[in-house]
Structure formats: structure tokens, C-alpha cells
Amino acid sequence: MEFNLTRPSKTDREVDTKGMLTTLTNLGLVEENNRQQLTELGEEFIDVLIYNEDAFFDLFHLLYSTAYYRNPSSNTGISWSYFQISDAYRRRAPTNFADARQEVIEEVMNRADRMESPIFNDPGPLSKRSLNSYKRFVEKLVPPVLKDGTFDLRSFAKNELVIAAVDSLYRSDILFKTLRYGDRLELSNESREFLSTVLLVYEDDLPELLEHTASMDGRLSIESDYSIRIRLTEEVNIDDLA
């Protein structure tokens, strides 16, 4: 199972997807029955790149991390693996990336073996090569999570990614089956872990990140008394992040 991605070159509104079609299809950006045709999500993604090319790796990390939770299927099993690798490193941070590599591979493969869904009957092999591909991808993230071979979490993530990560919680029937836009969501251990893994930030920094994002975007609000609750009133589309 590989995570080989490079920044696509673009001229006007054409994007070169050579070598990326399987990945783009699995992430829901390209139509499965016509891999030259972008889906609606793919069109939104390209719109962002046209106006904000620097967002490429951050957005792809977001899509890679959440595709399975948005649409669980055999195609998005690669997204599940990507998320689990991020989660395994998140819980070990700070750690030397290479030293933790074999341990992370074994942990993710064991998790796949325990999953009951037929989606995971053949999750694909993880290997050192897979982790090296993952490393080349996440080392492009800003703020960085990899410095001098050390994987560490960050205290800050861009507002656009924060609200998009919250939106993924609302879209997923796996995490919270009855959650709808406008409902209040308690920042429980499960939701904290999900957001921290998608954003690669420390859990203790989440409340401040969410408060800052809420102050910048009226769709998100946060309440705090004996617990912290967040509320997203409407969906966040990828092209909202341009």
C-alpha cells in the first residue's frame, strides 16, 4: 500500500494527473468509471488549487485522512490506513520517524486484522516503503510535523483545515451516526483524537484552535462550562477553503 503523490502541474485549469489516477479515484476526486472526469469534490479541489496552490499538501492530507470516514468502502481502505498511520505516530510524538516505523506498521496491520468489515479483508500490505512514501508526503505540511527525522505534533493548524476537519466529524456516519449540522457535539475523547490526528496537533491545543477558528468563521461556535461543545451550522465544501 503506497501513498505516492506529487504536486500536479497545471496550466490554466488543466491538471496533470499522470501516475495519480488510482489515488484520485480512491479519494473520490475522479469518477471511477471515467478516470478523465472529475467528481464534484474533484472540481472543488481543483478550484482551490487554482487560487491557492500552496494548499495542495495540506488539503491532500485532509482528504487522505478523512475519505474513509466520509465514504467507507473498499476503495477508501487506503484512507483508513493513512489515518491509522497518522494516529500511531501522533500517540508516539515526539518520536524518531525511522525508529518507530516497524512498530507503526505492525500496529496498523493488527488493527486491520481486528476490523470486522469486509472492507478490511485485504487492506493491502504496509511496508517500510509505504512509510517512506507517507513520510515524503507529510514532511511537506505547514506548519511542519517532521524536522531532522523527528515526528512531532504542532500547536497550530490553519483555520481552513480546522473547520474542514470539524466538518468531517459531521459528515461521518461511522463516528457519530445521528450527528447533523446544527447539533452540538461534545469534545469527547473520540472527537479529540479524530481532530488531533487529522490536524496533527496536540489535543491540549484543540480548544484554543477551535475558539480561534470560531472567531473567524460564523458557521462554527464553541461553548465551554463543565465540558467543551462545538457546533457547526452548515457544511463546509472544499472550495470554501480557497
Image: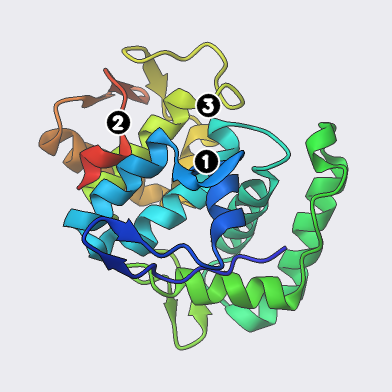
State the residue at coordinates (37%, 31%).
Answer: 167
Crowd tier of the residue under label 2, counting other residues whose Cα lies within 10 Å: few below 14, some 14–19, many 20 or above: some
**Number of callouts in the render?**
3
- Mark 3 residue type: Ser
Name the residue rendered at 60%, 46% in the picture: 26
Left or right, 6 with respect to 10, comes to right
Residue 36 x %, y %: 49, 49
User: Which quarter of the figure has residue 211?
Assistant: top left
Residue where numbered disc 1 is placed: 28
Q: What colour scheme governs how the chains and residues are painted in the rendered image of this protein?
A: rainbow
Mark 2 falls on what kind of element? loop
| Circle number at residue 172 | 3
For the point 68% across and 71% down, the residue is 130
| On-image quarter of the N terminus | bottom right
* Horizontal side of residue 199 vs 78, given as left or right: left
Taking depth in this image into account, of 155 and 68 the one nearest to the observer is 68
Q: Position of residue 57 (x, y in %)?
A: 38, 63
- Cα gap from disc 3 to disc 1, whole angstroms: 15 Å
* Residue 225 to residue 19: above or below: above
Name the spot of residue 234 as percent of width and height, x first.
28, 19
Marks 3 and 2, how far apart at CA: 13 Å
Along the line of sight, the residue nearer the viewer: 170 or 42 = 42
Question: For mark 2, what is the residue?
Answer: 236
Residue 129 can be seen in this image? yes
Q: Amino acid at mark 2?
A: Val
**Vertical order, 87 against 169 (above or below):** below
Describe the element under mark 1 as helix, strand or loop.
loop
